[in-house]
Amino acid sequence: MRILGIAPTLALSVGVAIAALTGCGGGTSTAIQPKPIPPGATQYIQIERLARPAVKEAFEMFARHDQTNRSSPYADPILPGDIVTFMTTAAGRDAATASAIQSILIPDEMVADLSQSASDGAYLGIETGGATGNKFGGRGLDNDVIAISLGAIFGNTLSALGVVPDDHHESPCLTNDNVPYDKTPNAAFPYLDPPK
C-alpha cells in the first residue's frame, strides 16, 4: 500500500504494522497458528502480491503469478502486458480501453492520500480522480471491488467516466459478480457479514 502524505504516513504505517501483529481488537490474537514443520520437510514461504483484488486473477494466467509476486509493482515484467493482451483478445476491447485499464491498475498497489478529508476509503478513488466516491483512495469496507473491476473490464465504466470513448464492445453479463452482502458493519472483526 502506498500512502501519500508525510507525517501521517509514518503513523499509519506503524499503526497498520501493530494492528497486523496484534490484531485489531487489542486482546488475544485469534489468528490461526502455523503447524510445526516436520523434520526433514521442505519449508515453503507463500509470497502473494495482491494489492487489488481480481487484477491478477482476471488478467494473468495462474502459472505466471509467481513471477509477478516476486517482482516490484513498479517493475513487473508480466502484468502490464497481460492486462492489455487480455483486454484486447479475451475481452474484445479496443486499444484505448485496454491502455486506460493498464494505466489505472499499474502499478499494482493500493494508494491512499491522507491529505484528503474523506471519512471512508474509495477503491480506485485516486486513480479515477474521485469518480468512485472520493479522492482518498484505499478501500472502504463497503466497496464492492469485484463489481467495480468487472464493470471496468467488461462494462462501460471507463466511458461513462469520460476516461475513453465507448468502444461498444461491452459484455453486460460479465459486469457484476451478483454477490450481494449486508453493508452494515459489525462492531467486531471481521466487521462485515459473509456474502449471502
Image (cartoon, rainbow, N blue to C red):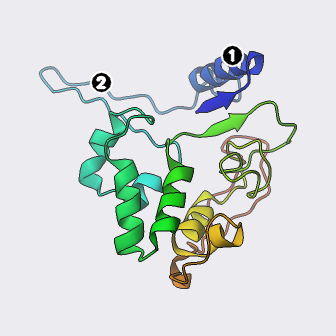
Image position, residue 67 (x, y; %): 28, 40
| Of the pair 20 and 166, the residue shown nearer to us | 166
Q: Earlier in the sequence, mark 1 or mark 2?
A: 1
Number of residues whose C-alpha sits closer than 10 Å to that of mark 2, classed few (under 14), some (14–19) or many (20 or more): few
Residue matched to label 2: 36
Judged left or right of residue 144, residue 134 is right
The answer, for residue 20, to whether it is visible in the render is yes
Mark 1: which amino acid?
Answer: Leu
Image position, residue 65 (x, y; %): 31, 47
The circle on residue 32 is none
Q: Nearer the viewer, mark 1 or mark 2?
A: 1
Residue matched to label 1: 10
Identity of the residue drawn at 48% across and 59% down: 99
Image: 4 above or below 167? above
Image position, residue 137 (x, y; %): 71, 44
Q: Secondary structure at mark 1?
A: helix
Identity of the residue drawn at 49% across and 46% down: 106
Mark 2: which amino acid?
Answer: Pro
| Of the pair 103 and 5, the residue shown nearer to us | 103
Identity of the residue drawn at 71% across and 66% down: 161
Image: 92 above or below 141? below
